[in-house]
Amino acid sequence: MKSLKASGHPLANSAVQLQSLQSEVADTLQLPSFHQKLAGAGLFPLQPLEPAVFQVNVGKMCNQVCKHCHVDAGPDRQEIMTRETMQQCLDALARTTIPTVDLTGGAPEMNPDFRWFVAEIRKLGRKVMVRCNLTIIVANPKYQDLPEFFREHQVEVVSSLPFYNADKTDRQRGKGVFDSSIRAMRMLNAVGYGQPDSGLLLNLVYNPNGAFLPGSQESLKRQFKRALLDEFGIVFNDLYAITNIPISRYLDYLISSGNYNNYMEKLVNSFNPAAAAGVMCRNTLSISWDGFIYDCDFNQMLDLKVASPVQHVRDFDERALNQRSVVVNQHCYGCTAGAGSSCGGTTA
């Protein structure tokens, strides 16, 4: 069987291209569709639960260009959420009891209205999580007070750190990223983040640097805690092991390296019904930079909007959205393989 690289298959970053690629590989390898797997587990169609997380992508601009980034973020991206759309998100939130707002990007802090948005969310009494890449804190003097800003608003900081040494981290995220990340974590520790009994949460995210599934989340957490404390005096609260989803830049890597077929086969063969029952798309609503609503941020990157008459946050109707079925496809195997994967780590 030829690899996709050998066969000269084009890279696939749109929903239509990806669907064609998924179908071709499923036929070649005789892989069941994700719909079939869910049906076999009694979970199709996948139904949403009470929404617990309101995830907002405030823009695709980022100071980094990471190899595994499913957002395809970078310094040249111009997609930025406006204050008007942010206000629509606030208006929608005010009509719900959704407890947590998860702010992501790009580097969400690069949105010029980021701090205003955080303060307004907190006025609604909601918890705020920020997906911070750490290096933004030390990238420019105007961001160096972010640890104090986060502390003031009791923001939970969730940060990607591929490994606890420079080699693996810089290979995935760029030269010098590890050293900058260590500086940023020390700044966060200095204002209380990760410290016992501070209530200031600093959680790390691990993504595998290759075509394989993450190891045990608990084991990885112990390794990271020991290494970062012993080598750098750094403490953090938790670690989330997240499977790389075969879309965008990571899909490009899989295809160009000839690993796509094997990776998809591995995901399918590792399907876990218990993980499928706990996937994040069941209790999360994902809002794009331009205000459209998705079941998760992976569907968002493929422009697979919610299967509901309500598709934009300006028309937000929680009751109507709760009556939808979750939109799924082959890339969803990434969230249901092994111990499962979500924005909060393993699901089973």
Image (tube, rainbow, N blue to C red):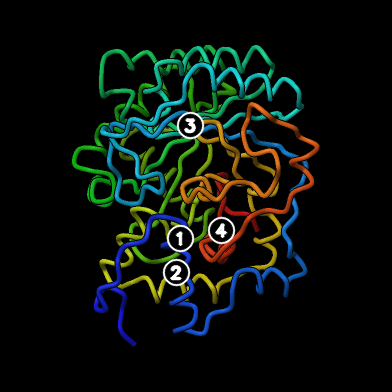
CA gap between label 3 and label 2 equals 27 Å
Nearer-N-terminus badge (3/2): 2
The residue that mark 3 highlights is 289
At numbered mark 1, what does the secondary structure look like: helix, strand or loop? helix
At numbered mark 4, what does the secondary structure look like: helix, strand or loop? helix
Q: Are marks 4 and 3 in contact (CB under 8 Å)?
A: no
Q: Quadrant of residue 205?
A: top left
In the image, residue 220 lies at what x, y percent?
46, 53
Kindly report which numbered mark, 3 or 2, lies closer to the viewer in this rendering. 2
The residue that mark 1 highlights is 16
Nearer-N-terminus badge (2/4): 2
Nearer-N-terminus badge (1/3): 1
Kindly report which numbered mark, 4 or 1, lies closer to the viewer in this rendering. 1
Nearer-N-terminus badge (4/1): 1
Q: Dot 4: few (<14), some (14–19), or many (≥20) neighbours within 10 Å?
A: many
Q: Return the mark for residue 235.
A: none
In the image, residue 298 lies at what x, y percent?
51, 49
Q: Are marks 4 and 1 in contact (CB under 8 Å)?
A: no
Q: Return the mark for residue 335.
A: 4
User: What residue type is disc 2 on?
Assistant: Ser
Nearer-N-terminus badge (4/3): 3
User: What residue type is disc 3 on?
Assistant: Trp
The answer to whether 194 appears left or right of 211 in the picture is: right
Q: Return the mark for residue 20.
A: 2
Kindly report which numbered mark, 4 or 3, lies closer to the viewer in this rendering. 3
CA gap between label 4 and label 3 equals 23 Å
In the image, residue 344 lies at what x, y percent?
57, 44
User: What residue type is disc 1 on?
Assistant: Val
